[in-house]
Image: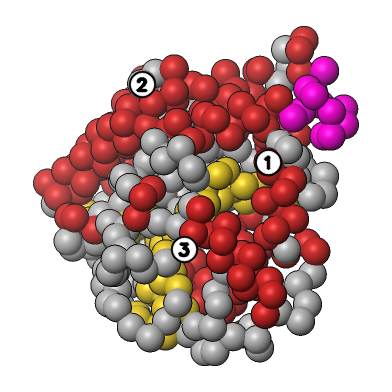
Amino acid sequence: MTIQIPENIKPEDHRFGSGPSKIRPEAIASLGQSDAQYILGTSHRQAPVKAVVASLQVGLASMLNLPGDYQIVLGIGGATAFFDIAAFNLIERRSQHLVFGEFSSKFAQSAAAAPFIDDPEIIESEPGTHPISHRSDVDTYAMTLNETSTGVSMRVERPGPGAFTIVDGTSGVGGVPIDATETDVLFFSPQKGLAGEGGLWLAAMSPAAIERVNVVSQSRDYIPPFFDLSLAIDNSTKHQTYNTPPLIGLMLIDHQLQWINQNGGGQWALKRCATSAETLYSWAETSPYAEPFVKDPSQRSAVTGTIDFDESVDAKLVASTLRENGIVDVEPYRKLGRNQLRVAMFPAIDPSDIEALTVCIDYVVSQTR
Ligand SMILES: *Cc1c(COP(=O)(O)O)cnc(C)c1O
Protein backbone atom coordinates (compact mmCIF):
# COMPACT_ATOMS: atom_id res chain seq x y z
CA MET A 1 0.00 0.00 0.00
CA THR A 2 1.42 3.35 -1.03
CA ILE A 3 -0.56 5.78 1.10
CA GLN A 4 -1.76 4.98 4.58
CA ILE A 5 -4.57 7.14 5.95
CA PRO A 6 -4.05 7.74 9.69
CA GLU A 7 -6.61 5.76 11.74
CA ASN A 8 -7.58 8.80 13.80
CA ILE A 9 -8.98 10.73 10.84
CA LYS A 10 -10.95 7.82 9.33
CA PRO A 11 -14.77 7.74 9.48
CA GLU A 12 -16.43 5.42 12.03
CA ASP A 13 -18.08 3.49 9.21
CA HIS A 14 -16.39 2.76 5.91
CA ARG A 15 -19.42 2.57 3.56
CA PHE A 16 -20.36 5.45 1.25
CA GLY A 17 -21.95 3.60 -1.68
CA SER A 18 -24.91 5.08 -3.57
CA GLY A 19 -26.58 1.70 -3.91
CA PRO A 20 -26.92 -0.32 -1.87
CA SER A 21 -26.72 1.97 1.16
CA LYS A 22 -24.73 1.35 4.29
CA ILE A 23 -26.85 -0.78 6.62
CA ARG A 24 -26.47 0.25 10.25
CA PRO A 25 -24.56 -2.29 12.38
CA GLU A 26 -27.48 -2.26 14.84
CA ALA A 27 -29.83 -3.41 12.05
CA ILE A 28 -27.45 -6.19 11.01
CA ALA A 29 -27.08 -7.29 14.65
CA SER A 30 -30.87 -7.44 15.06
CA LEU A 31 -30.93 -10.30 12.53
CA GLY A 32 -28.92 -12.39 14.98
CA GLN A 33 -31.17 -11.73 17.95
CA SER A 34 -33.26 -14.57 19.28
CA ASP A 35 -36.64 -13.41 18.00
CA ALA A 36 -35.29 -13.37 14.42
CA GLN A 37 -35.66 -17.17 14.29
CA TYR A 38 -39.44 -16.78 14.62
CA ILE A 39 -39.39 -14.75 11.38
CA LEU A 40 -36.46 -15.91 9.21
CA GLY A 41 -37.13 -19.32 7.75
CA THR A 42 -40.88 -19.17 8.39
CA SER A 43 -43.87 -18.78 6.07
CA HIS A 44 -44.49 -15.34 4.64
CA ARG A 45 -48.21 -16.09 4.75
CA GLN A 46 -48.34 -16.47 8.54
CA ALA A 47 -48.63 -13.96 11.35
CA PRO A 48 -44.96 -13.36 12.28
CA VAL A 49 -43.84 -12.22 8.80
CA LYS A 50 -47.14 -10.48 8.09
CA ALA A 51 -46.60 -8.48 11.28
CA VAL A 52 -43.26 -7.27 9.92
CA VAL A 53 -44.90 -6.22 6.65
CA ALA A 54 -47.75 -4.47 8.50
CA SER A 55 -45.24 -2.68 10.71
CA LEU A 56 -43.17 -1.44 7.79
CA GLN A 57 -46.32 -0.29 5.97
CA VAL A 58 -47.34 1.79 9.00
CA GLY A 59 -43.78 3.01 9.52
CA LEU A 60 -43.40 4.12 5.91
CA ALA A 61 -46.77 5.91 5.87
CA SER A 62 -45.68 7.75 8.98
CA MET A 63 -42.19 8.65 7.73
CA LEU A 64 -43.65 9.94 4.45
CA ASN A 65 -46.50 11.72 6.23
CA LEU A 66 -48.92 10.05 3.79
CA PRO A 67 -52.58 11.04 3.56
CA GLY A 68 -54.73 8.38 5.31
CA ASP A 69 -56.24 7.10 2.06
CA TYR A 70 -52.88 6.25 0.44
CA GLN A 71 -51.92 2.59 0.42
CA ILE A 72 -48.48 0.99 0.76
CA VAL A 73 -48.10 -1.74 -1.85
CA LEU A 74 -45.08 -3.99 -2.25
CA GLY A 75 -43.77 -6.68 -4.53
CA ILE A 76 -40.73 -8.45 -5.87
CA GLY A 77 -38.33 -7.17 -8.52
CA GLY A 78 -37.12 -3.73 -7.42
CA ALA A 79 -37.65 -0.36 -9.07
CA THR A 80 -36.45 -1.77 -12.38
CA ALA A 81 -39.40 -4.18 -12.40
CA PHE A 82 -41.69 -1.31 -11.47
CA PHE A 83 -40.73 0.56 -14.65
CA ASP A 84 -42.48 -2.24 -16.55
CA ILE A 85 -45.25 -2.52 -13.96
CA ALA A 86 -46.01 1.15 -14.65
CA ALA A 87 -46.22 0.46 -18.37
CA PHE A 88 -48.51 -2.55 -17.90
CA ASN A 89 -50.80 -1.13 -15.22
CA LEU A 90 -50.63 2.64 -14.85
CA ILE A 91 -50.00 4.40 -18.17
CA GLU A 92 -53.33 4.45 -19.92
CA ARG A 93 -52.27 5.58 -23.37
CA ARG A 94 -49.25 7.88 -23.20
CA SER A 95 -46.80 9.13 -20.59
CA GLN A 96 -44.42 12.04 -20.29
CA HIS A 97 -40.95 11.34 -18.85
CA LEU A 98 -38.37 13.70 -17.44
CA VAL A 99 -35.02 12.19 -18.46
CA PHE A 100 -31.80 13.40 -16.84
CA GLY A 101 -29.63 10.37 -16.25
CA GLU A 102 -29.40 6.60 -16.31
CA PHE A 103 -32.40 5.65 -14.18
CA SER A 104 -34.89 8.20 -15.52
CA SER A 105 -33.81 7.11 -18.99
CA LYS A 106 -34.48 3.44 -18.24
CA PHE A 107 -37.92 4.35 -16.92
CA ALA A 108 -38.68 6.13 -20.22
CA GLN A 109 -37.31 3.19 -22.23
CA SER A 110 -39.75 0.80 -20.53
CA ALA A 111 -42.66 2.97 -21.65
CA ALA A 112 -41.18 3.38 -25.14
CA ALA A 113 -40.75 -0.38 -25.57
CA ALA A 114 -44.27 -1.34 -24.47
CA PRO A 115 -46.24 -2.12 -27.67
CA PHE A 116 -49.68 -1.51 -26.12
CA ILE A 117 -49.15 2.21 -25.34
CA ASP A 118 -48.07 5.16 -27.49
CA ASP A 119 -44.49 6.39 -27.58
CA PRO A 120 -43.83 8.58 -24.56
CA GLU A 121 -43.13 12.29 -24.63
CA ILE A 122 -39.58 12.69 -23.41
CA ILE A 123 -38.24 15.92 -21.94
CA GLU A 124 -34.52 15.69 -21.48
CA SER A 125 -31.82 17.88 -19.94
CA GLU A 126 -28.03 17.80 -19.66
CA PRO A 127 -26.47 15.56 -16.98
CA GLY A 128 -26.13 17.63 -13.81
CA THR A 129 -29.48 19.40 -14.31
CA HIS A 130 -33.11 18.34 -14.43
CA PRO A 131 -35.85 19.13 -16.95
CA ILE A 132 -39.15 20.77 -16.06
CA SER A 133 -42.49 19.14 -16.69
CA HIS A 134 -45.28 20.91 -18.53
CA ARG A 135 -48.90 20.05 -19.14
CA SER A 136 -49.44 18.15 -22.38
CA ASP A 137 -51.45 15.51 -24.18
CA VAL A 138 -50.56 12.62 -21.86
CA ASP A 139 -52.38 10.78 -19.07
CA THR A 140 -49.32 10.13 -16.89
CA TYR A 141 -46.37 12.27 -15.78
CA ALA A 142 -43.28 10.23 -14.84
CA MET A 143 -40.59 11.84 -12.70
CA THR A 144 -37.53 10.84 -10.73
CA LEU A 145 -37.04 12.33 -7.28
CA ASN A 146 -33.29 11.78 -7.21
CA GLU A 147 -31.26 10.87 -10.29
CA THR A 148 -28.73 8.67 -8.55
CA SER A 149 -26.36 8.56 -11.52
CA THR A 150 -25.70 12.31 -11.56
CA GLY A 151 -26.61 13.48 -8.04
CA VAL A 152 -29.49 15.71 -9.13
CA SER A 153 -32.75 15.85 -7.21
CA MET A 154 -35.95 17.62 -8.13
CA ARG A 155 -38.90 19.16 -6.38
CA VAL A 156 -41.85 16.98 -7.35
CA GLU A 157 -44.99 18.89 -8.29
CA ARG A 158 -48.04 18.05 -10.35
CA PRO A 159 -47.71 19.96 -13.62
CA GLY A 160 -51.37 20.94 -13.29
CA PRO A 161 -54.43 20.25 -11.12
CA GLY A 162 -55.36 16.57 -11.23
CA ALA A 163 -52.33 15.60 -13.33
CA PHE A 164 -51.52 11.93 -12.62
CA THR A 165 -47.91 11.55 -11.41
CA ILE A 166 -45.72 8.48 -11.01
CA VAL A 167 -42.45 9.16 -9.23
CA ASP A 168 -39.39 6.93 -9.00
CA GLY A 169 -38.34 7.74 -5.45
CA THR A 170 -35.50 5.20 -5.28
CA SER A 171 -32.49 6.72 -3.47
CA GLY A 172 -34.46 9.89 -2.70
CA VAL A 173 -37.08 8.54 -0.31
CA GLY A 174 -35.94 9.15 3.26
CA GLY A 175 -33.42 11.86 2.45
CA VAL A 176 -34.87 14.16 -0.23
CA PRO A 177 -37.94 16.23 0.66
CA ILE A 178 -41.13 15.21 -1.14
CA ASP A 179 -44.77 16.09 -0.63
CA ALA A 180 -46.54 12.78 -1.15
CA THR A 181 -49.80 14.56 -2.07
CA GLU A 182 -48.07 15.68 -5.28
CA THR A 183 -47.74 12.02 -6.30
CA ASP A 184 -50.19 9.30 -7.22
CA VAL A 185 -47.57 6.57 -7.18
CA LEU A 186 -44.31 7.01 -5.31
CA PHE A 187 -42.34 3.82 -5.88
CA PHE A 188 -38.83 2.85 -4.89
CA SER A 189 -36.36 0.08 -4.13
CA PRO A 190 -35.60 -0.17 -0.42
CA GLN A 191 -31.82 -0.73 -0.52
CA LYS A 192 -31.00 2.97 -0.67
CA GLY A 193 -32.68 5.41 1.75
CA LEU A 194 -34.34 2.60 3.69
CA ALA A 195 -31.10 0.62 4.06
CA GLY A 196 -32.85 -2.62 3.16
CA GLU A 197 -31.91 -5.24 0.60
CA GLY A 198 -32.39 -5.17 -3.15
CA GLY A 199 -35.07 -7.29 -4.80
CA LEU A 200 -38.23 -5.60 -3.54
CA TRP A 201 -40.23 -2.59 -4.66
CA LEU A 202 -42.51 -0.50 -2.49
CA ALA A 203 -45.10 2.01 -3.66
CA ALA A 204 -47.29 4.57 -1.92
CA MET A 205 -50.45 4.73 -4.02
CA SER A 206 -53.26 7.31 -4.00
CA PRO A 207 -56.94 6.38 -4.43
CA ALA A 208 -56.67 7.74 -8.00
CA ALA A 209 -53.80 5.31 -8.64
CA ILE A 210 -55.79 2.32 -7.37
CA GLU A 211 -58.67 3.43 -9.62
CA ARG A 212 -56.26 3.84 -12.57
CA VAL A 213 -55.08 0.23 -12.17
CA ASN A 214 -58.70 -0.97 -12.44
CA VAL A 215 -59.36 1.09 -15.54
CA VAL A 216 -56.14 0.15 -17.34
CA SER A 217 -56.49 -3.58 -16.63
CA GLN A 218 -59.71 -3.61 -18.65
CA SER A 219 -57.95 -2.35 -21.76
CA ARG A 220 -54.96 -4.76 -21.72
CA ASP A 221 -55.14 -8.09 -23.52
CA TYR A 222 -52.69 -9.66 -21.12
CA ILE A 223 -50.71 -8.68 -18.02
CA PRO A 224 -48.18 -11.25 -16.75
CA PRO A 225 -49.16 -12.03 -13.13
CA PHE A 226 -45.69 -11.07 -11.89
CA PHE A 227 -46.27 -7.55 -13.27
CA ASP A 228 -49.96 -7.36 -12.35
CA LEU A 229 -50.39 -4.49 -9.94
CA SER A 230 -53.92 -5.54 -8.91
CA LEU A 231 -52.49 -8.80 -7.54
CA ALA A 232 -49.84 -6.83 -5.64
CA ILE A 233 -52.47 -4.46 -4.24
CA ASP A 234 -54.68 -7.37 -3.07
CA ASN A 235 -51.74 -9.09 -1.42
CA SER A 236 -50.50 -5.90 0.21
CA THR A 237 -53.82 -5.27 1.95
CA LYS A 238 -53.21 -8.69 3.56
CA HIS A 239 -49.59 -7.76 4.40
CA GLN A 240 -48.27 -10.27 1.90
CA THR A 241 -46.61 -10.33 -1.49
CA TYR A 242 -47.72 -12.20 -4.60
CA ASN A 243 -44.64 -14.43 -4.51
CA THR A 244 -42.01 -15.11 -1.87
CA PRO A 245 -40.22 -12.02 -0.54
CA PRO A 246 -36.69 -11.78 0.92
CA LEU A 247 -37.45 -11.89 4.65
CA ILE A 248 -34.13 -10.36 5.72
CA GLY A 249 -34.89 -7.43 3.46
CA LEU A 250 -38.29 -6.92 5.10
CA MET A 251 -36.73 -7.02 8.58
CA LEU A 252 -34.04 -4.50 7.65
CA ILE A 253 -36.57 -2.06 6.19
CA ASP A 254 -38.72 -2.31 9.28
CA HIS A 255 -35.69 -1.79 11.50
CA GLN A 256 -34.61 1.31 9.59
CA LEU A 257 -38.12 2.83 9.65
CA GLN A 258 -38.43 2.24 13.38
CA TRP A 259 -35.05 3.84 13.94
CA ILE A 260 -36.06 6.90 11.89
CA ASN A 261 -39.53 7.21 13.39
CA GLN A 262 -38.26 6.80 16.98
CA ASN A 263 -35.73 9.57 16.40
CA GLY A 264 -38.19 12.14 15.11
CA GLY A 265 -39.52 10.73 11.85
CA GLY A 266 -39.23 11.89 8.28
CA GLN A 267 -38.21 15.45 9.19
CA TRP A 268 -35.36 14.15 11.32
CA ALA A 269 -34.05 11.93 8.51
CA LEU A 270 -34.28 14.80 6.00
CA LYS A 271 -32.36 17.08 8.36
CA ARG A 272 -29.66 14.46 8.87
CA CYS A 273 -29.11 14.19 5.10
CA ALA A 274 -29.26 17.97 4.68
CA THR A 275 -26.52 18.32 7.29
CA SER A 276 -24.34 15.80 5.47
CA ALA A 277 -24.95 17.54 2.16
CA GLU A 278 -24.11 20.96 3.58
CA THR A 279 -20.83 19.53 4.87
CA LEU A 280 -19.91 17.88 1.56
CA TYR A 281 -20.84 20.72 -0.79
CA SER A 282 -19.37 23.52 1.31
CA TRP A 283 -16.14 21.54 1.57
CA ALA A 284 -16.06 21.17 -2.23
CA GLU A 285 -16.93 24.83 -2.82
CA THR A 286 -14.03 26.03 -0.68
CA SER A 287 -11.59 23.38 -1.92
CA PRO A 288 -8.90 24.60 -4.34
CA TYR A 289 -9.29 21.43 -6.47
CA ALA A 290 -12.88 20.20 -6.02
CA GLU A 291 -16.31 21.55 -6.88
CA PRO A 292 -19.88 20.27 -6.87
CA PHE A 293 -20.77 18.77 -10.28
CA VAL A 294 -24.32 20.11 -10.02
CA LYS A 295 -24.08 23.87 -10.50
CA ASP A 296 -27.53 24.89 -9.27
CA PRO A 297 -27.55 24.44 -5.46
CA SER A 298 -31.32 23.86 -5.48
CA GLN A 299 -30.82 20.79 -7.71
CA ARG A 300 -28.00 19.25 -5.64
CA SER A 301 -28.92 15.95 -4.09
CA ALA A 302 -28.92 15.61 -0.31
CA VAL A 303 -28.29 11.86 -0.63
CA THR A 304 -25.90 11.29 -3.54
CA GLY A 305 -23.28 14.02 -3.83
CA THR A 306 -21.23 14.24 -7.02
CA ILE A 307 -17.93 16.11 -6.74
CA ASP A 308 -15.74 17.01 -9.71
CA PHE A 309 -11.96 17.36 -9.38
CA ASP A 310 -9.65 19.52 -11.48
CA GLU A 311 -6.89 17.99 -13.60
CA SER A 312 -4.34 18.21 -10.75
CA VAL A 313 -6.22 15.40 -8.99
CA ASP A 314 -6.80 11.85 -10.27
CA ALA A 315 -10.20 10.99 -8.80
CA LYS A 316 -9.77 7.31 -9.77
CA LEU A 317 -6.57 7.17 -7.75
CA VAL A 318 -8.25 8.88 -4.80
CA ALA A 319 -11.09 6.33 -4.89
CA SER A 320 -8.74 3.36 -5.15
CA THR A 321 -6.50 4.72 -2.36
CA LEU A 322 -9.54 5.16 -0.11
CA ARG A 323 -10.57 1.61 -1.00
CA GLU A 324 -7.12 0.24 -0.10
CA ASN A 325 -7.62 1.95 3.24
CA GLY A 326 -11.00 0.29 3.71
CA ILE A 327 -13.19 3.27 2.76
CA VAL A 328 -15.39 2.01 -0.06
CA ASP A 329 -17.73 2.82 -2.95
CA VAL A 330 -17.11 6.53 -3.68
CA GLU A 331 -16.43 5.74 -7.35
CA PRO A 332 -18.61 7.84 -9.70
CA TYR A 333 -21.35 6.46 -11.90
CA ARG A 334 -19.35 4.64 -14.55
CA LYS A 335 -21.18 5.91 -17.64
CA LEU A 336 -20.89 9.56 -16.64
CA GLY A 337 -17.16 9.37 -17.40
CA ARG A 338 -16.04 12.34 -15.27
CA ASN A 339 -13.04 12.97 -13.01
CA GLN A 340 -15.40 12.65 -10.10
CA LEU A 341 -16.30 11.02 -6.80
CA ARG A 342 -19.86 10.21 -5.77
CA VAL A 343 -20.61 10.15 -2.06
CA ALA A 344 -23.80 8.69 -0.59
CA MET A 345 -25.35 10.55 2.33
CA PHE A 346 -28.34 8.31 2.98
CA PRO A 347 -30.09 8.54 6.38
CA ALA A 348 -28.07 5.56 7.70
CA ILE A 349 -24.81 7.44 7.10
CA ASP A 350 -23.64 9.59 9.98
CA PRO A 351 -23.10 13.26 9.09
CA SER A 352 -19.87 13.21 11.10
CA ASP A 353 -18.61 10.44 8.81
CA ILE A 354 -19.16 12.70 5.78
CA GLU A 355 -17.00 15.29 7.53
CA ALA A 356 -14.33 12.66 8.22
CA LEU A 357 -14.47 11.48 4.61
CA THR A 358 -13.69 14.98 3.32
CA VAL A 359 -10.69 15.10 5.67
CA CYS A 360 -9.52 11.73 4.31
CA ILE A 361 -9.93 12.90 0.70
CA ASP A 362 -7.85 16.01 1.46
CA TYR A 363 -5.22 13.80 3.10
CA VAL A 364 -5.02 11.46 0.11
CA VAL A 365 -4.83 14.37 -2.33
CA SER A 366 -2.06 16.01 -0.28
CA GLN A 367 -0.07 12.77 -0.55
CA THR A 368 -0.60 12.26 -4.28
CA ARG A 369 -0.19 15.73 -5.81
C1 LIG B 1 -31.04 2.20 -7.94
C2 LIG B 1 -32.11 2.87 -8.70
C3 LIG B 1 -33.01 2.16 -9.50
C4 LIG B 1 -32.89 0.68 -9.72
O1 LIG B 1 -33.15 -0.04 -8.57
P1 LIG B 1 -33.09 -1.64 -8.61
O2 LIG B 1 -33.47 -2.04 -7.24
O3 LIG B 1 -31.70 -2.02 -8.98
O4 LIG B 1 -34.08 -2.09 -9.63
C5 LIG B 1 -34.01 2.86 -10.14
N1 LIG B 1 -34.13 4.19 -10.01
C6 LIG B 1 -33.30 4.92 -9.25
C7 LIG B 1 -33.47 6.39 -9.16
C8 LIG B 1 -32.26 4.29 -8.57
O5 LIG B 1 -31.41 4.99 -7.81
Residue 65, picture quadrant: top left
Residue 214, picture quadrant: bottom right
Distance in Å between CA atoms under marks 1 and 2: 27 Å
| Vertical order, 350 against 216 (above or below) | above
Disc 1 packing (10 Å; few <14; some 14–19; many ≥20)? some
Residue 61 in the image: state x and y as whole percent: 48, 36
Q: Judging from the image, what secondary structure is the residue with disc 2 in?
A: loop
Judge whether residue 322 can be spotted in this image.
Answer: no
Judge whether residue 230 can be spotted in this image.
Answer: yes
| Vertical order, 76 against 258 (above or below) | below
Tag 1–tag 3 contact (CB < 8 Å): no
Describe residue 29's horizontal placement relative to residue 44 as left or right.
left
Q: Is residue 45 magenta?
A: yes
Name the foreground residue: 227 vs 307: 227
> Residue 237: which disc?
1
Q: Is residue 137 magenta?
A: no
Report the colour scheme.
secondary structure
Total numbered labels placed on residues in the image:
3
Q: What's the magenta region?
A: 37-50
What amino acid is found at the position of numbered circle 2 in the picture?
A: Gly
Q: Which residue is mark 2?
A: 264
Residue drawn at 49 percent across, 21 percent down: 259
Distance in Å between CA atoms under marks 2 and 3: 27 Å
> Residue 166: which disc?
3
